[in-house]
Image (cartoon, rainbow, N blue to C red):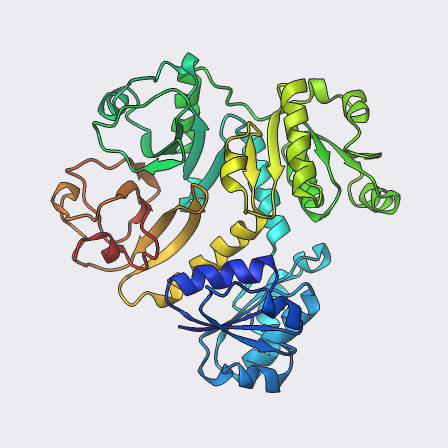
Amino acid sequence: MNIIVIGCGKVGITLAELLSAEHHDIVLVDESSQKLQSIPESLDALRIQGNGASINTLMEAGLDGTDILISVTGSDELNLLCCLIAKKAGKCHTIARVRNPIYNREIEFIKEKLGISMIINPELTAASEISRLLRFPSAIKIDTFAKGRVELLKFRIRPEFKLDEMPIHQFGRIHGNVLICAVERANAITIPDGNFILKDNDVLSIIASPKNAAEFFRSIGLKTNQVRNTLIVGGGKIAYYTALFLQEMKIDVRIVEVNQARCEKLSELLPETTIIHGDGTDKQLLLEEGLAEAESFVTLTNLDEENILLSLFAQSNSKAKLVTKVNRISFTEIINNLDIGSVIYPKYLTADYILQYVRAMQNSIGSNVETLYQILDNRAEALEFAIREKSVVTDIPLSQLPLKSNLLIGCINRHGKIRIPRGQDSIQVGDTVIIVTTRKGLHDIQDILRK
């Protein structure tokens, strides 16, 4: 497809790289020549300098033949204007990044009146992920499918779990309602078969219903109840949205913010949250504000280095569930070797939702990508396909399907009932099916088969 991306910040470049890797024709537009020049040479995309809200710029970018326009500049209003002009002057789908909390209450009105196909709020999406993690603190990461009926959870094997040297087929007999879909070991990722042997310190990704996941974690001695309180450092938009989610969950929230004006604003917006004016990098302040007793600690400053160091400090001074926000991903492997709990990458969360929309648009057969997550540090994908009509994968026992390598059918959702699939099960019309794979770019359920 032909796609225009307006805005060459972190999100815009990440999106362009992911979409280009899927063989879409990309045009990047930005007013800054410096930003355009800093785009990696390896990125196969046309660069155009100009205002994305200018019809002349859009026509130069090929608006007439464009399928999707995505606007992710730093201005909500500019993003909405770019989409409005593109919608009026062309026939493309439009996606806008809108971050201001004021607009968040008017999303449906804006979409309907301006004809925008999708509005994405990265901070709200990140806050939603943080709230899920604090509801289930044993997991490093949680992704949801089938409208919350299925979860993909990531956790590290500890010696006390007694899973060391256990083959997958034995695990399946003991924990039949839980499926291990991926294993991370020493920077290598494996989609395991029944003979794979688990080892202490492996990071497992499992698929299960929330109830079965909770029962599994209880059986190996991991905490499953949500945290009762949290200490957040950094009072930006993510902290605001996170506090709203956590207040609904009856979790006590304390936010440390260095800017006094922002503290006063947060006090107005969040009357049930304790706002502390102070430097969140002051170790003594954190200890005085109860870090040692906190059940969770979330670092949301604008500096990755601060967030990582604060989480390392908390790790050595408390037993809190740690959540660390990271914007840049240049040092992902180093970060993974640090014991800093769950790491949130807002720009990848944004890219996931937009990729999901793009892939759903591409489907030519009777199945759609309902949900898509880049998982395992963007080295694998978990996708949920809705099966709309009969095809070569339906009504055939899974054991007889010629599946591609490095791919696993993780779960079948049939009329709200969750099945961990076995060889005799089959995919049927009306199901939603979860696929986990290290193969990128699956667009349709038939892509799971060998050619």
Is any atom of residue 292 visible in this view? yes
Number of numbered discs visible in the structure rendering = 0
Residue closest to the far left: 400
Q: Dividing the image into 4 quarters, which one contains the N terminus?
A: bottom left
Is any atom of residue 272 visible in this view? no
What residue is rendered at 65% in x and 73% in y?
33
Residue 424 at x, y percent in the picture: 14, 38
What residue is rendered at 19% in x and 53% in y?
449
Q: Judge from the rendering whether residue 347 lies leftward or rightward of residue 230; answer left or right.
A: left
Residue 187 at x, y percent in the picture: 41, 35
Q: Is residue 341 above or below residue 97?
A: above
Residue 330 at x, y percent in the picture: 54, 47
Closer to us: 171 or 119: 171
Q: Judge from the rendering whether residue 273 lies leftward or rightward of residue 219; answer left or right.
A: right
What residue is rendered at 53% in x and 81% in y?
61
Q: Judge from the rendering whether residue 191 lies leftward or rightward of residue 260; answer left or right.
A: left
Task: Name the image quarter holding residue 446.
Answer: bottom left
